[in-house]
Image: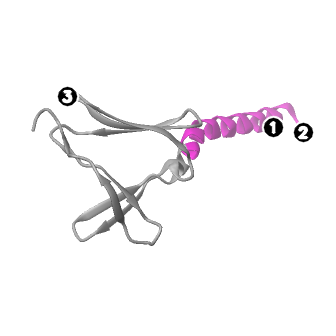
Amino acid sequence: MNSKLKQRAKARVKSKVRRESKSTPDKANRGFALIERRRSGRKLVEFPRMKGRTVEKIALFTSSGYHSVRVDFQDKTSLNITIEPDFAFKANYADLTTGNERRIRNWPAIRSQGL
């Protein structure tokens, strides 16, 4: 094989490696895609990569211009959900063992400062 052919082959390998390394973040984030379901005026969004993680703490942060829910996991990662201003946050704790939701505890609504 002459030297020009070797150089072309090396250049093709290098460009292929560069293309793969540029696309790696996209490939790594594919598993973090959300699952969205729409039904009669409702929208359900699931975070599948969070399944099976053990929750250490859940916190609601609210101020005049910023609202978020932070879920801390035992593996020292967290899921942060930012909520747009002017909301009412309602929480309940439920038993799902029978397949139907049986409410155990309801908390009073937490309203943003704009409401």
Which residue reaches farthest left?
A: 115
> Which type of secondary structure does the marked residue at label 3 adopt?
loop
Stretch in magenta: 1-28
* Residue at numbered disc 3: 65
Q: Residue at x 21, y 46 (%)?
A: 108
Foreground residue among 78 and 105: 105
Q: Nearer the viewer, residue 82 or 4?
A: 82
Judge by depth and name the residue closer to the eye, 8 or 17.
17
| Residue 51 on image: x %, y % | 53, 53
- Whether label 1 touches label 2, CB < 8 Å: yes
Q: Is residue 112 left or right of residue 99?
A: left
Q: How far from the left and from the top, in percent, is residue 64? A: 17, 27
In the structure shown, which secondary structural element does the residue marked by tag 1 occupy? helix
Task: Give the alpha-carbon distance from disc 3 to disc 1, as whole Å.
Answer: 62 Å
Residue type at the position of mark 2: Met
Image quadrant where residue 103 sits: bottom left
Q: Amino acid at mark 1?
A: Leu
The image quarter containing residue 44 is bottom left
Q: CA distance from mark 1 to mark 2?
A: 6 Å
Identify the mark at residue 77; answer none if there is no mark: none
Q: Nearer the viewer, mark 3 or mark 1?
A: 3
Q: Position of residue 14 (x, y in %)?
A: 71, 34
Magenta stretch contains residue 56: no
Residue of label 1: 5
Label 2 sits on residue: 1
The residue under label 3 is which amino acid type?
A: Gly
Which residue is at a point 14% across and 32% down the rendered structure image? Answer: 113
Q: Under tag 2, what secondary structure?
A: loop
Q: Locate the N terminus by quadrant.
A: top right
